[in-house]
């Protein structure tokens, strides 16, 4: 497998070399640690290095705060949720409830036009 992320950027931002990235990618089966989307060597399909922003705020992390490799969607999901597990649990519960009640209006009021 080719490198899951750009090694120069990972080394500069997180202190990881190509061997560290390769080991992390192998441990994750070459896929996103959250959703399992497989890595592809093309723009927008590579994996991003995820780090704990409580340890190292900003875009630059260190080897001690690396959590895994994520696809862009999952990396942005965590960022937009403020890395708050409770917020993510509430969002998941909301989606579960909303999918069951998606057609509540039509069921209770009849179809519109």
Image: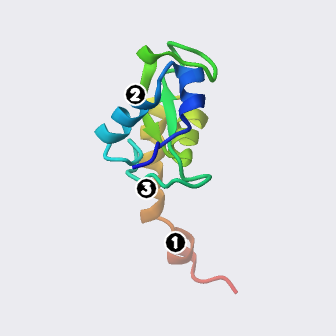
Q: Can residue 82 be seen here? A: no
Q: Secondary structure at mark 3?
A: helix
- The image shows a total of numbered marks equal to 3
How far apart are labels 2 and 3 at the CA level? 41 Å
**Is 60 rendered above or below residue 42?**
above
Q: Secondary structure at mark 2?
A: helix
Rendering coords of residue 96 (x, y %): 41, 55
Residue neighbourhood size for the residue with mark 1, other residues' Cα within 10 Å, grouped as few (<14), some (14–19), many (≥20)? few
**Measured along the vertical axis of the image, is residue 103 above or below residue 43?**
below
Quarter of the figure that contains the C terminus: bottom right
Residue 103 is tagged as 1
Give the residue at mark 2.
20
Secondary-structure class at tag 1: loop
Given residues 16 and 60, the one toward you in this image is 16
Residue drawn at x 60%, y 30% is 9
Disc 3 marks which residue?
97
Q: CA distance from mark 1 to mark 3?
A: 12 Å
Query: Mark 3, residues whose alpha carbon is within 10 Å: few (<14), some, or many (≥20)?
Result: few
Looking at the image, do the residues carrying marks 2 and 3 touch, with CB atoms under 8 Å apart?
no
């Amino acid at each position: 497998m080719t490198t899951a992320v750009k090694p120069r950027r990972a080394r500069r931002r997180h202190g990881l070399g190509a061997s560290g990235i390769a080991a992390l990618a192998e441990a994750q089966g070459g896929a996103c640690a959250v959703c399992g989307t497989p890595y592809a060597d093309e723009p927008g399909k590579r994996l991003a290095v995820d780090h704990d922003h409580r340890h190292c705020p900003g875009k630059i992390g260190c080897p001690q705060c690396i959590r895994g490799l994520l696809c862009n969607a999952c990396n942005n999901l965590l960022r937009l949720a403020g890395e708050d597990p409770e917020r993510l649990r509430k969002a998941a519960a909301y989606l579960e409830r909303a999918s069951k009640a998606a057609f509540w209006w039509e069921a209770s009021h009849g179809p519109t036009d």
